[in-house]
Amino acid sequence: MYDNRTLVKNIFTWLAGGTEPAGATITVTSPNGGEDWAAGSTHNVTWNYTGDPGAQVKIELLKGDAVDTVISSGAPVGTEGAGSYSWTIPKNQAPGGDYTVRVTSTSDSSCTDTSDGSFSITAPSNTVVGFDPSETTVYKNPIEDYSPEFVISVTINGLAGGQKILSFHDMIKFDPALLEAVKVEIPTGSLLEPVLFWDHQIDNQHGVIEFALARENVNYPGSGGLVYNITLRARGEGTTALNHLSPELRNDRNLPVQVGTSSCTVNVTSLVGDFNADGNIDSADKEVFSLSWKHKAGDTGWDEKVPGVPGTPYRQADIGPAAGAPPGLVVQPDGMVDFEDLSVFALMWNWNKGHINLDKNQLKLFEAAGLDHKRFLIPGK
Ligand SMILES: [Ca+2]
Ligand SMILES: [Ca+2]
Ligand SMILES: [Ca+2]
């Protein structure tokens, strides 16, 4: 059906010797058959046009031959012969393999086109690109520039059964004031083995890790697991998060698999007396404390780490006097490691142990200092 203006134009065209009415045309380009789109995901419906189909088009979802949904009753036709409409498929859209999309001029219903072939709407995806662990506490010795290195795994979970994954592109954002990425590696047993090719880039200035992987199309990954490991170290204290920025998984037809993301919370903190920053006050820390015993500001090795001299810088053991209660003691260093520091160390030791449990060797430190260790012990439970 033509409106009058088109009709008049077509008659004149015909009178001028044309054999066909020179109407506008629309051609749907996506989805045009073969696509797998998950309910809940967002895709562009695209079309080309010639002539002047008018300002707007109606976009319909057809299931079989019947109209299932009007996706848009009046979307802009586009510019320079091409139009596009961002469509979020409702989460409750019935899965099926017989869907097509029809795009029709709102001013000329004969100017219309439908997907050449049918496409599939699949069940909503539960696939999540996340981290393992999803929360971690990292300990840092305040006098050190960096915490010990720690590893966070990037995971993919909830892959639908029989889902072939061919490629994975990931971007992780972190706070560069608190964290530094050291390395990225794919461990044996990665979910996406066998790997055909992979690469990564670390940008510690902006806090970005980019990772890309292509895998061989030979078998199906399990439903979930770890893909790659990031080694990090902390360089500040506080709480921050690692976040995935729009990771992209593609299947064996090079079509995107809809994914959600989850983050990893990283708490960077320090424990008074935890000189090796492993989250425990134990004999390794006691060793550092003994080496610092009776040292004071001005001694060689007080301020600076001396190569080959264990325990330096000794000022790390200047943890007394301190106010408050373990573990949140507020330290007021006074430039010497003496009884006050030993008392604070014992408080933290006992906080860590939760009860009095010093063995003979552990008692030697107290005896060497001429102290009655019981003075410093919190009543055991
Ligand atoms: Ca078509
Ligand atoms: Ca420790
Ligand atoms: Ca002190």
Image (cartoon, rainbow, N blue to C red):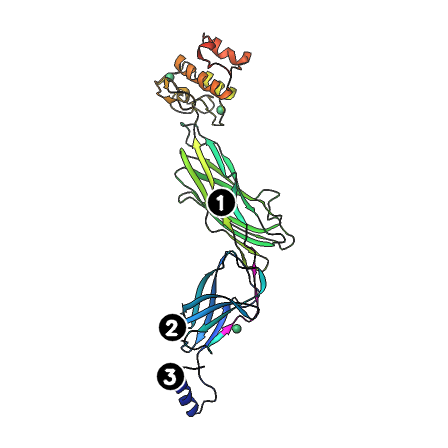
Give coordinates of residue 56: x percent, y percent: 40, 71
Residue named by callout 2: 55
Q: Residues within 10 Å of mark 3 (few under 14, many from 20)?
A: few
Give coordinates of residue 51: x percent, y percent: 42, 78
User: Which kind of residue does numbered mark 2 sit on?
Assistant: Ala
In this orientation, does residue 324 appear?
yes
Q: Is 120 one of the magenta-colored residues?
A: yes
Calculate the distance from the C-alpha at mark 1 to the C-alpha at mark 3: 56 Å
Indicate which label's residue lies in the foreground, 1 or 3: 3
Q: Nearer the viewer, residue 191 or 50?
A: 50
Considering the numbered disc 1 on the image, is that residue within a helix, a strand or a loop?
Answer: loop
Return the mark for residue 262. Answer: 1
> Is label 1's Cβ within 8 Å of ligand 2?
no
In this orientation, does residue 185 appear?
no
Q: Which residues are magenta?
A: 113-124
> Is label 3's Cβ within 8 Å of ligand 1?
no
* Precedes in sequence: disc 3 or disc 2: 3
Quarter where residue 252 is shown: bottom right
Calculate the distance from the C-alpha at mark 1 to the C-alpha at mark 2: 41 Å
On the rendering, which quadrant does ligand 3 occupy? Answer: top left
Q: Residue at x 40, y 40 (%)?
A: 176
Asked if the residues shown at circle 3 and circle 2 are in contact, with their CB atoms under 8 angstroms apart, the answer is no
Residue named by callout 3: 5
Quadrant of image for the N terminus: bottom left
